[in-house]
Amino acid sequence: MSEPAKAYWIANVTVTDPAAYQGYQALAPEAFRKYGARFLARGEAETLEGTAWQRRVIIEFDSMAQARACYNSAEYRQARQERAGACTADIALIEAVSQS
């Protein structure tokens, strides 16, 4: 039986209220820790096409189910409430390409 494909959480974020965004930053790490998230990239990025965002984040999970569970967890819901109104964000989940 093969293992599930890894999944990636890709977030594009522009912070509009840094003080309020600190509430999100204080709470979100607990959800990521609990669901085994591994940060692969985060910070400013060069936009070659499309919408320019202040920061971009790529987070790896062991599976799509684990990534969804993190996003829908009570811990992350609370963090998202803190983030509301403090930024604009686009978040997507994508499954890794099979290497077999």
Image (tube, rainbow, N blue to C red):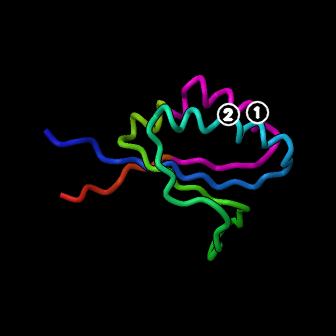
State the SS at label 2. Answer: helix
- Mark whose residue sits in front, 1 or 2: 2
Residue 88 part of the magenta segment:
yes
**Which residue shows up at 51% across the image and 48% down it?**
9
Q: Earlier in the sequence, mark 1 or mark 2?
A: 2
Describe the element under mark 1 as helix, strand or loop: helix
Numbered circle sitting on residue 27: 2
The mark found on residue 82 in the picture is 1
The quadrant in which residue 61 appears is: top left
Q: Which residues are magenta?
A: 70-92
Where is residue 97 drawn, in percent x and y? 31, 57
CA neighbours of label 2 inside 10 A, class few (<14), some (14 to 19), many (20+): some
**What residue do we see at 54% from left, 29% from top?**
72
Q: Is residue 88 above or below residue 31?
A: below
Query: Is 62 in the magenta?
Result: no
Amino acid type of the residue that numbered disc 1 sits on in the rendered structure: Glu
Q: Position of residue 23 (x, y in %)?
A: 77, 36
Q: Alpha carbon of mark 1 to alpha carbon of mark 2: how far?
A: 8 Å
Residue 63 place in picture, x, y as percent: 36, 41
Q: Residue furthest bottom?
A: 48
User: Is residue 98 depicted above or below 27 in this figure?
Assistant: below
